[in-house]
């Protein structure tokens, strides 16, 4: 048996980022940038007002108070989107709106709430500091500056930046296309009524859903039967994609032919018993230049193996820099006894509490118990040599879905 860490290391050595393509800014969301994006203009493009108010010369308000207000002549109105009609001179002010360019000569903007006005004049009741309420040209970024680095994940913040600098198209890494093949004579499709001895192909959907949640494009190739011919046909079709995933047929059963057929199609296939629970049998190799994962058949085993090995591989293919799931420390809410020897991934419920994170291991840890997976949001990671934990121990937890970021009540 090999450890989870060394299996992961061996796999990632074989994975390369895919090529680049040019896409529009919204298609880039969730992808990784393949080029530095530079600004061709500063932001803000010119000094502009941060408030609705009056642009003026700060020294004109020196010593201004309720008893001794400054009175300035308002020379024109300046809405956002228009250019100043002329400079501001001593004793003058311009009625300015948020975002409008600051007129020449003006050194500050007083907010409208601190003034009162009449026909052609404004009264200012307090001193205005130099630069007050002026957003300086280039204070966000300068012209020529790299505003989104190559290798960045495009989130809404990056979309905002790309739109700000006027980059409607950009280079991003391609989305991996992931072919998914389920294997087993016992499997039927989701819309069929299974006769005795048959079950529905849930792995084909679960793995496609996991791939989709990673930002990849799943290609569901359906069911291969437990014959070499049927497996050969499906796995050959799968080689059209960027990455191949099969489930089932990698154990030591009489009909477990996935290993043989992958070997037949591939250069070097590795077959492992990985010291993990669930998810022990695993095949990995590169066939036709494409990474191929032979995941175990038990539903939870295949999902756990996907989380540990396929997710980081897909992220690496998609050009991402941070490819591993963050591990949280949480206080375990009850004792957990484990037989040592394998790294255990215990389905659990991670919660954010007033005193930090807590985690509760769930009942029903069998590798086919999907209902526990449905109730869980994370795995407690039990190291290979550990015999488990005592209530209130701090343990490592790997969340597997983004719902951990959401709560049923605001947390202010
Ligand atoms: P295997 O490794 O092929 O012996 O499969 C192990 C267990 O996982 C068996 O109980 C299979 O019926 C089950 N299994 C295999 N493939 C699937 C699948 N696509 N969907 C649901 N269960 C499966
Ligand atoms: Mg099988």
Image: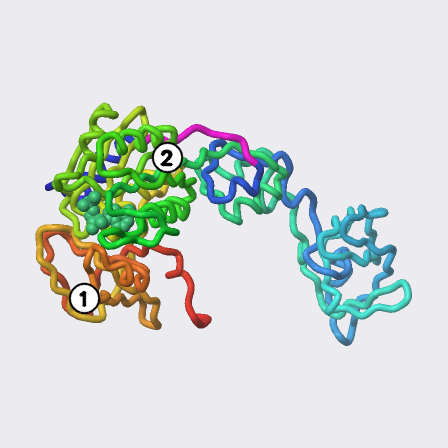
10 Å neighbourhood of mark 2: few (<14), some, or many (≥20)?
Answer: many
Question: Magenta segment range?
Answer: 15-23
Where does label 1 land, which residue?
393
**Left or right position of 1 against 318:** left
Above/below status of 176 relative to 357: above
Disc 2 secondary structure class: helix
Residue in the foreground of this view, choosing between 80 and 393: 393
On the rendered structure, is 220 left or right of 81? left
Q: Who is closer to the viewer here, 293 or 335? A: 293
Q: Is residue 130 visible?
A: no
x, y percent for residue 349: 29, 65
Residue at image position (75%, 70%) is 125
* Rendering coords of residue 113 (x, y %): 73, 69
Image quarter (top left, top right, bottom left or bottom right) of the N terminus: top left
Where residue 253 appears, x then y in whole percent?
Answer: 13, 42
Residue 206 in the image, given as x and y percentages of width and height? 34, 50
> Residue 350, located in which quarter of the rendered image?
bottom left
- In the image, what residue occupies the spot 52% across and 40% down? 28
Label 2, label 1: how many angstroms apart (C-alpha)? 37 Å
Q: Which mark is residue 9?
A: none
Q: Which residue is mark 2?
A: 317
Q: Earlier in the sequence, mark 2 or mark 1?
A: 2
What residue is rendered at 49% in x and 47% in y? 155
CB atoms of marks 2 and 1 within 8 Å: no
The answer to whether one can see residue 135 in this image is yes
Residue 164 on the magenta span: no
Ligand 1 within 8 Å of the CB at mark 1: no
The quadrant where residue 244 appears: top left
Q: Is mark 2 within 8 Å of ligand 1?
A: no
Furthest residue toward bottom = 67
């Amino acid at each position: 048996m090999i450890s989870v860490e060394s299996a992961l290391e061996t796999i990632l050595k074989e994975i390369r980022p895919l090529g680049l393509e040019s896409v529009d800014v919204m298609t880039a969301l969730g992808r990784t940038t393949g080029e530095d994006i530079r600004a061709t203009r500063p932001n803000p493009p010119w000094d502009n007002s941060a408030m609705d108010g009056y642009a003026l010369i700060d020294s004109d308000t020196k010593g201004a108070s309720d008893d001794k207000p400054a009175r300035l002549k308002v020379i024109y109105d300046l809405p956002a989107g228009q250019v100043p009609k002329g400079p501001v001179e001593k004793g003058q002010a311009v009625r300015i709106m948020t975002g409008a360019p600051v007129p020449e000569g003006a050194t500050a903007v007083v907010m409208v709430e601190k003034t009162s006005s009449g026909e052609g004049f404004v009264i200012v009741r307090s001193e205005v500091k130099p630069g007050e309420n002026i957003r300086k040209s280039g204070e966000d970024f300068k012209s020529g500056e790299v505003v989104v680095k190559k290798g960045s994940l495009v989130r809404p913040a990056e979309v905002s930046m790309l739109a700000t600098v006027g980059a409607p198209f950009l280079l991003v890494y391609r989305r991996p296309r992931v072919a998914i093949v389920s294997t087993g004579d016992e499997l039927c499709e989701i819309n069929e009524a299974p006769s005795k001895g048959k079950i529905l192909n849930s792995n084909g959907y679960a793995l496609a859903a996991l791939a989709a949640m990673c930002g990849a494009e799943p290609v569901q190739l359906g069911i291969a039967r437990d014959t070499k011919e049927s497996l050969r046909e499906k796995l050959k079709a799968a080689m059209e994609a960027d990455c191949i995933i099969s489930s089932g047929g990698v154990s030591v059963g009489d009909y477990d032919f996935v290993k043989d057929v992958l070997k037949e199609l591939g250069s070097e296939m590795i077959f492992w018993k990985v010291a993990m629970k669930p998810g022990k049998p695993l095949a990995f190799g590169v066939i036709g230049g494409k990474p191929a994962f032979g995941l175990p058949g038990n539903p939870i085993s295949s999902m756990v193996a996907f989380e540990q090995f396929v997710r980081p591989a897909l992220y690496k293919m998609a050009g991402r820099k941070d490819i591993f799931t963050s591990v949280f420390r949480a206080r375990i809410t009850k004792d957990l006894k484990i037989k040592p020897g394998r790294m255990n991934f215990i389905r659990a419920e991670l919660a954010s509490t007033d005193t930090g994170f807590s985690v509760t291991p769930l009942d029903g840890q069998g590798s086919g118990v999907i209902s526990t997976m449905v109730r869980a949001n994370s795995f407690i990671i039990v190291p290979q040599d550990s015999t488990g934990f005592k209530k209130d121990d701090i343990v490592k937890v790997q969340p597997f879905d983004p719902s951990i970021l959401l709560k049923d009540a605001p947390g202010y």
